[in-house]
Image (cartoon, rainbow, N blue to C red):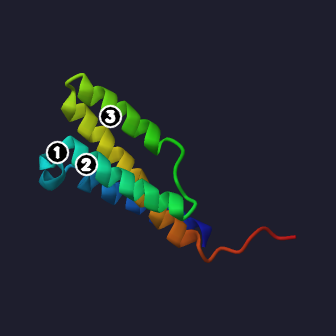
Amino acid sequence: MKAIKLGLISLIIAFLGACSTNSTETSASFDDSVKDANATIDQAKAADYEWRDSRKILKKATKLNAEGKTDEAMKLVAKAKQQGTIAIAQAKEQSDVAGPRL
């Protein structure tokens, strides 16, 4: 069962990685993309599954955008949003797992 769950998470990561470069996302403005990523990460936080580095990645993206490196910044925003999406899926997948055995 554990192997199936790990396989599912790996598949989700691979799928989202392939989808992260779609034309809709790259045409959105940087600020809108950051707001969207923050909303996704907030959903993960509400489920108590926020990943540690997601907001750090957004902070780095903001810095790169300010330096004029918008393409690199957009890739990082997509990565942070992807982490939020995977964290939400992870929360749903783990919601039926029992606590530690006593």
Return the x and y of residue 89 as percentages of the image width and height: 46, 66
Residue placed at 25% from the left, 26% from the top?
66
Of pointers 1 and 3, the one earlier in the residue sequence: 1
Of pointers 2 and 3, the one earlier in the residue sequence: 2
Return the x and y of residue 69 as percentages of the image width and height: 21, 26
Return the x and y of residue 15 as percentages of the image width and height: 32, 59
Q: Quadrant of the N terminus?
A: bottom right
Instruction: Kindly identify which numbered label has been placed on residue 29.
Output: 1
Instruction: Kindly identify which numbered label has been placed on residue 71.
Output: none
* Residue 67 against residue 89 in the figure, above or below: above
Q: Secondary structure at mark 1?
A: loop
* Residue 74 against residue 97 in the figure, above or below: above
**What separation in Å lies between label 1 and label 3 (alpha carbons)?**
13 Å
Residue placed at 53% from the left, 71% from the top?
93
Q: Type of residue at label 2?
A: Ser
Give the number of callouts. 3
Q: Are marks 1 and 3 in contact (CB under 8 Å)?
A: no
What residue does disc 3 label?
61
Return the x and y of residue 48 as percentages of the image width and height: 58, 60
**What separation in Å lies between label 2 and label 1 (alpha carbons)?**
6 Å
**Residue 73 sits in quarter:** top left
What residue does disc 2 label?
33
Horizontally, residue 94 falls left or right of residue 89, namely: right
